[in-house]
Image: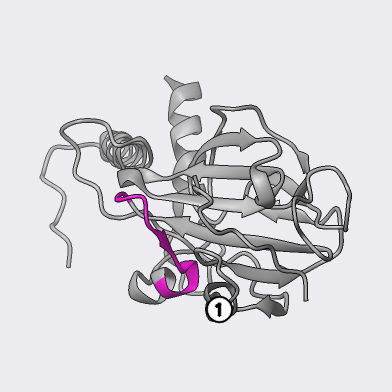
Amino acid sequence: MGREHLPGCCGGGGEQPQAGLSRRTLLRGTALTTGALAVGGVFGLPGIAHAAPSIYNPFAGYAITGSWQDHLNSGSLGGIDFGMGVGTNLPACGAGTIQNIPNNGTGGHTVTIHHADGYRSQYMHLSQFLLANGAAVGAGAIVGRSGGAVGAPGSGSSTGPHLHWHMINPSGVRINPLTYIGQNPGGGLPKTSTEQDGIPGTIFYKRMQNWLRITS
């Protein structure tokens, strides 16, 4: 089972439209409001309320080869290991900004995603960084490629190909991302306008914003 030992490692019902407003004016207002909320939720602009970051599990299709408790039992501060081949694309579990940490002790090459409200996610034992420090990403964006092969650059103390994932709360304590998701449901990739429920999602509104920009 590929697992690193990380003792002491820092992980680092809606209202009706008012009479006299044109359809275009309504669309413009909706798009601008949606955009402002999205920016506030991701970057935490002052004056705009936002909840804890929306996180999803991009690795649900991979077997867990090391549980949270397995890590604690081995002296680690905690993490989840997912078995996957070297070079597997790693999607961001939520929106944020990127920090790359080469050779992060026993964790090897590490990507940190800084989310809203001081939360962070870390992927460890990477074989390749793909984005620059400070790059802004949305949920599902590819932030790096997995590694973990014994002795390979960036593998740290890994004993086999896998990805290690943990989160860090605003107090600097490692937390189980799967537990966090269970307690904060609603995360996932942005919806498109082709959702079965027929409700337009964020991609739809981004396209509408672009259309408004062009027509203006």
Q: Residue at the spot x=36%, y=50% of the render? A: 172
Closest to the observer, 178 or 214: 178
| Residue 57, above or below 19 | below
Residue bearing mark 1: 73
| Residue 64, above or below 155 | below
The quarter of the picture where the C terminus appears is: top left
Q: Is residue 158 left or right of residue 179?
A: right
Colour mode of the rendering = one colour
Q: In this view, does 72 lie to the left or right of 15?
A: right
Residue 134 at x, y percent in the picture: 54, 27
Residue 132 at x, y percent in the picture: 65, 27
Give the magenta range.
Answer: 170-179
Q: Residue 178 colored magenta? A: yes
Q: Residue at the spot x=52%, y=74% of the render? A: 72
Q: In this view, does 166 lie to the left or right of 25?
A: right
Closest to the observer, 67 or 179: 67
Count all numbered tags in the image, as a single digit.
1
Report if residue 142 is visible in the image: no
Rendering quarter of residue 81 = bottom right
Q: Residue 114 colored magenta? A: no
Query: Dot 1: what SS?
Result: helix
The quarter of the picture where the N terminus appears is: bottom right
Q: Residue at the spot x=27%, y=39% of the render? A: 33
Q: Residue at the spot x=88%, y=48% of the render? A: 152
Crowd tier of the residue under label 1, counting other residues whose Cα lies within 10 Å: few below 14, some 14–19, many 20 or above: few
| Residue 167, above or below 83 | above
Q: Identify residue type, mark 1.
A: Asn
Report if residue 159 is visible in the image: yes
Residue 53 at x, y percent in the picture: 37, 54
